[in-house]
Image: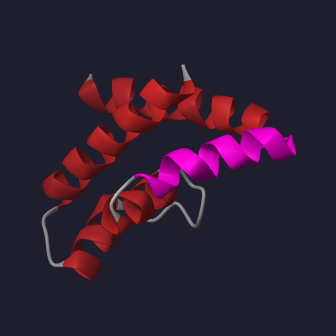
């Protein structure tokens, strides 16, 4: 159930991001919010949301030497921050 909720949450956020990034002003808002995050959170969020290559939790975790659960937590916190700024 949590995986489905996270997937729906990602899809909703991606849809909002897609709408926002159609304009220069929207792209600037997204980049400004992403720039407030720590580099690892920013990269993990971009990867998990498919803004780069949609890499799996396992692959991202292996790159950083942490568990997939830790990556999931970082992505969830970063999504929350991004969502809060976009509302």
Q: What are the residue bounds of the magenta stretch?
A: 21-36
Q: Residue at x 49, y 57 (%)?
A: 35
Residue 83 image position (x, y, % from top left): 47, 29
Judge from the rendering whether residue 77 lies leftward or rightward of residue 28; answer left or right. Answer: left
Residue 41 image position (x, y, % from top left): 34, 58
Q: Residue at x 50, y 52 (%)?
A: 34
Residue 30 occupies quadrant: top right
Judge from the rendering whether residue 7 lies leftward or rightward of residue 74; answer left or right. Answer: right
Instruction: Identify whether 80 is placed above or below 87.
Output: below
Q: Quadrant of the N terminus?
A: top left
Pick the front one: 68 or 18: 18
Instruction: Identify whether 80 is placed above or below 32.
Output: above
Q: Quadrant of the C terminus?
A: top right
Residue at the farthest right position = 23
Q: Residue at x 51, y 45 (%)?
A: 33
Q: Main secondary structure of the magenta part?
A: helix
Pick the front one: 11 or 46: 46
Residue 61 image position (x, y, % from top left): 23, 69
Pick the front one: 68 or 75: 75
């Amino acid at each position: 159930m949590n995986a489905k909720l996270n997937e729906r949450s990602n899809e909703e956020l991606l849809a909002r991001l897609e709408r926002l990034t159609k304009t220069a002003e929207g792209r600037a808002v997204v980049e400004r919010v992403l720039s407030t995050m720590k580099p690892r959170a920013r990269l993990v969020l971009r990867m998990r949301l498919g803004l780069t290559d949609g890499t799996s939790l396992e692959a991202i975790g292996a790159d950083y030497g942490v568990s997939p659960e830790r990556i999931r937590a970082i992505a969830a916190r970063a999504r929350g921050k991004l969502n809060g700024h976009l509302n």
